[in-house]
Image (cartoon, rainbow, N blue to C red):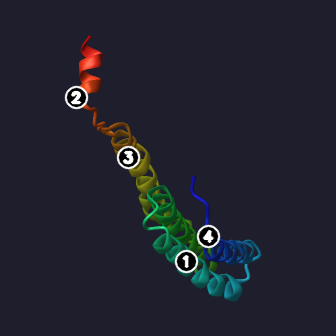
Amino acid sequence: MYTIPDRFRRIENLHIMFWLLKDISWAMLWKPVGLVMFIPTIVFAVLITFQTRNLVSEFYHNLAIVFWILANGYWMIAEFFWPDDDYLRNYTAIPFSIGIFFILLYYLVVLPRVKKKEKMVTISIEVSESTLKLAKE
């Protein structure tokens, strides 16, 4: 079972705070705050992804989160600056789809390979000749 080191947990908690501040700023149409909060939100998401690069499950899920935040940030910026151009929202499908791709890749390709490797464990036991003779009798 994976436990999150304290230094990672603090970064993740700070990331959540920035993400929530970005989203509430978007909902309340506070453009400057939303734009400023987008920067640490995406930076922390990339940092968390980098920190978890050796933990396969965490890495793929965090990659998906990075693309989710990119889609979310693009959508927010489009609504802030071009509120009448609703079609711009459709372009969020690109980074959202990339995020879904990483999740599907993990569950359909990576995880089955990891599980297959776990099942293919070889155990070798050295047995003395006298034990072999007893077993044959």
- What residue is pinned by disc 4? 5
CA–CA distance between discs 1 and 3? 29 Å
Q: CA distance from mark 2 to mark 1?
A: 64 Å
Where disc 3 sits, the SS reads helix
Q: Quadrant of residue 115?
A: top left
Kind of residue sitting beneath label 1: Ile
Three-letter code, disc 3: Val
Pick whichever, 91 or 62, lies toward us: 62
In the image: residue 39, left or right of residue 67:
right
- Quarter of the rendering containing residue 131: top left
Q: Position of residue 128 (x, y in %)?
A: 26, 32
At label 4, counting other C-alpha atoms closer than 10 Å, the crowd grade (few under 14, some 14-19, many 20 or more) is few
- Could you tell which of marks 4 and 1 lies nearer the N-terminus? 4
Give whichever of discs 3 and 2 has the lower sequence position. 3
Tell me the mark number nearer the camera, choosing from 4 and 2: 2
Of the two numbered discs 2 and 1 in the rendering, the one whose residue sits closer to the viewer: 2
Q: Which residue is mark 3?
A: 114
Q: Label 3 crowding class (10 Å Cα cut-off): few <14, some 14-19, many 20+?
A: few
Amino acid type, callout 2: Glu
Q: CA distance from mark 4 to mark 3?
A: 23 Å
Q: Quadrant where the C terminus lies?
A: top left
Identify the residue under disc 2.
Answer: 129
The residue where tag 1 is placed is 42
Q: Residue furthest front?
A: 130
Give the residue drawn at x 45%, y 59%.
60
